[in-house]
Image (cartoon, coloured by chain):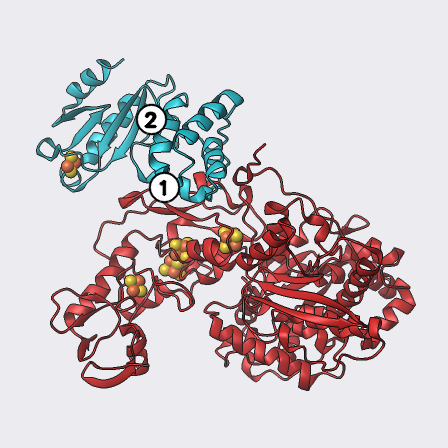
Amino acid sequence: MGSVTETKFEVLNDELASKIDKILSENAYDSTKLVGILLDVQDVVPKKYVPMDVAAYVAAKLNIPLTGVYDVITFYASLSEKPRADHVINLCKSIVCKTNNYMDLQKSLEKFLGIKVGEATEDGKFALEYSACFGACDVAPAIKIDQDVYGKLTDEKLIEIINSYR
Amino acid sequence: MKEIKLSINNQKIVVPAGTTILEAAKEVGVHIPTLCYHPDQAIKANCRVCVVEVKGSRKLSAACSTPVWEGMEVITTSKKVLDSQKGVVELLIASHNQDCLNCQRNGTCELQNLAERFNIGKTNLDIDILTLPIDDGNPSIVRDPSKCIKCNRCVETCSKTQGVDVLTHAHRSDQYIISTPYNLPLGSTLCTFCGQCSAVCPVGAIVEKDNTEQVFEAIENQKKHVICQVAPAIRTALGDAFGLDDGAIVTGQMVNALKQLGFDKVFDTNFTADLTIIEEGNELIDRITNGGTLPMITSCSPGWINYVEGKYDHLLDHLSTCKSPQQMFGALSKSYYAEKMGIDPKDICTVSIMPCTAKKFEAQRDEMNTNGVRDVDVVLTTRELAKMIKMTGIDFEVLQEKEFDSPFGIGTGAAVIFGATGGVMEAALRTVYEVVVGEPMPSIDFEPARGLQGIKEADVDLNGTVVKVAVAHGLSNAKIVMDMIDKGECPYAFIEIMACPGGCVGGGGQPINTTMATKSKRIESTYKIDKEKLQYRKSHENPAINKLYEEYLEKPLGHKSHELLHTHYHPRDKKIGNIKLK
Ligand code: SF4
Ligand code: SF4
Ligand code: SF4
Ligand code: FES
Ligand code: FES
């Protein structure tokens, strides 16, 4: 039985705080605009994610619970709670890709990149994430690297594509 | 009220408008399966296990959320209905860590009950369990997400009932989970360890930390003198775990069971509840007459203390400095009692039986020791005690009644009502009034403090000075009172706050299936014990307490009292959920 270990993401400094304050005031501290606020905030954080202390800061400033902020960050695929990498590889796990054995593709990806789904490579180049259907069912199983879609991949082709992003 | 006629499985029934199919079916003796539904909570309708057929509608309807209408014809027994209900359970089991034999909820689990009801043994579906780590890094609560069925009951309890808000749903579709922000361990959030989430969870995904093994070991150890204290709210709740009527009074049977389990002495926390009243009552009089910080707020509920230390750490001076009855007992057991018995305090193991998971946390606080020896060594919840009794094959129902041991065996009615919301207030007033006014309160039953209303207030005339008092239970009600103090708009001089709705009878460690209705029954029994079963009803009349002051403590708020019976508070560590803005 493993125990939960605490992840520390201490990113917030005065400079970042004042950038966040600016975003908040542009949105009139209106918590109904939370998604837009978080997207803008994520954009000013290095590695493009919303770290814990940043989320807590936004929650406190908007006077809403951190739980609600966290719920939104994890609900939208365009928001991330973890540091991202230069390139994000999305692996589709929806129904068509599932029936077309996305698991094999996942195994290959994990082998080539040396990471598991949900992790990023040590050099910070690639992050591997699951995603829901992005409309490439005709070439399932499919991946999306940043905005580019690839499907029906052999191992050789996969390596070639990944290397083209290095 | 408007009445609605409908039929359920062709049985005719008339119910008030607004009744749901689920409630109407119960009236005619049909129990529709449920999982996300909880009688004390808002309707969530997310699990779909309660679907039934309504004639004329093509889709099945969720019974928990569908109100009845005139002429409605409901069928709950068709193959279509059963297949759907069974399908929901099967799907849940396919993503469930089926570990019943090792699970604390084996036997009281709603999912397991349904699996049995639908005769689901193994499923043919692919097993796909989200593997997230178990959080057992705090003294009170263990969270195991692999058993969570995502009903959201805990989320509602933590955010709405308690207003603590450390649990939420997160992610979506097949990654949907119940989580803390950033999946922090509970110990790194402002969780109060009240355990209310563990009391409403239908399965074994949030449970109390199990310390029963430690107690069996201590009893087995010949070198240890193992004693126990039992909180006021156990005697009206323990029977539930053995199928007795809600609120059954089982004091004597409980003492008997504890003696059979091998405790060297079985004592009553009521004794130190009386002591708390003497110390706290005098503290209140002292604050009123000498211009101390008012309002003074009670300090016996450790979930409440955790809450205020986390969210209102600038208002800690309002807390009474009295330790809780549990900790007063612990301190006396390692000092007065040890001396009296001629036993080295290190060889005494003090176990408490509490309705509360936060008591486990309280017992482990650094400051809760007497000359370096822990005041209380192990805390068991009502559920854990029931488990020990079952494990040892003691037939609870047929047990003869036994008496508590002395010197900590006498408690008054004022102490027993600590178990119900308003009880500490009433107990304190019974004593404070008499000390200040010089004669007993006009009526010993202080009705304004009783009942399940979230916040209760009253005026008390103390020799011409009208003192306003208030009682709050459930942390969301505590928040309302604290915000009044924070804004300088609080008219009260004395406030009782309990973390759990209903007070300790509704504690987070009480038997599974405790609902508001159960709590009412327990509260009724509590006042019955006060009125009918005990010789004394006021703390200052407890002869054993008076003897304790004569022999040992000298006087209330005296030097010895301060050393043993009082404590201090500190802001909780800077947790991430508690970011302070400049
Ligand atoms: S939660 Fe229920 S079904 Fe799951 S392992 Fe525990 S007892 Fe079994
Ligand atoms: S123990 Fe209480 S405060 Fe902690 S998560 Fe459960 S309900 Fe919330
Ligand atoms: S932890 Fe329990 S109460 Fe909370 S959502 Fe999961 S199953 Fe429901
Ligand atoms: S199911 Fe995978 S892209 Fe549509
Ligand atoms: S009990 Fe009705 S939907 Fe869950």
Which residue position is annotated with label 2? A115
Q: Which chain is red?
A: B
Residue B580, image x, y percentages: 57, 36
Task: Give neighbour class at mark 1: few <14, some 14-19, many 20+ (Cα, 10 Å).
Answer: few
**Could you say where residue B416 lies in the image, as x and y percent from the top left?**
68, 74
Q: Secondary structure at mark 1?
A: helix
Residue A34 % position (x, y): 37, 37
How many numbered discs, if any? 2
Vertical side of B153 occupied by B53: above or below: below
- Residue tagged 1: A32
Image quadrant assignment for residue B558: bottom right
User: Residue B334: which disc?
Assistant: none
**Is any part of residue B541 visible from this angle?**
yes
Q: Nearer the viewer, mark 1 or mark 2?
A: 1
Q: Quadrant of the C terminus of chain B?
A: top right
* Up-down relation of residue B371 to residue B577 (above or below): below
Chain on which label 1 sits: A
Query: Would you say A122 lies left or right of A61 here?
Result: left
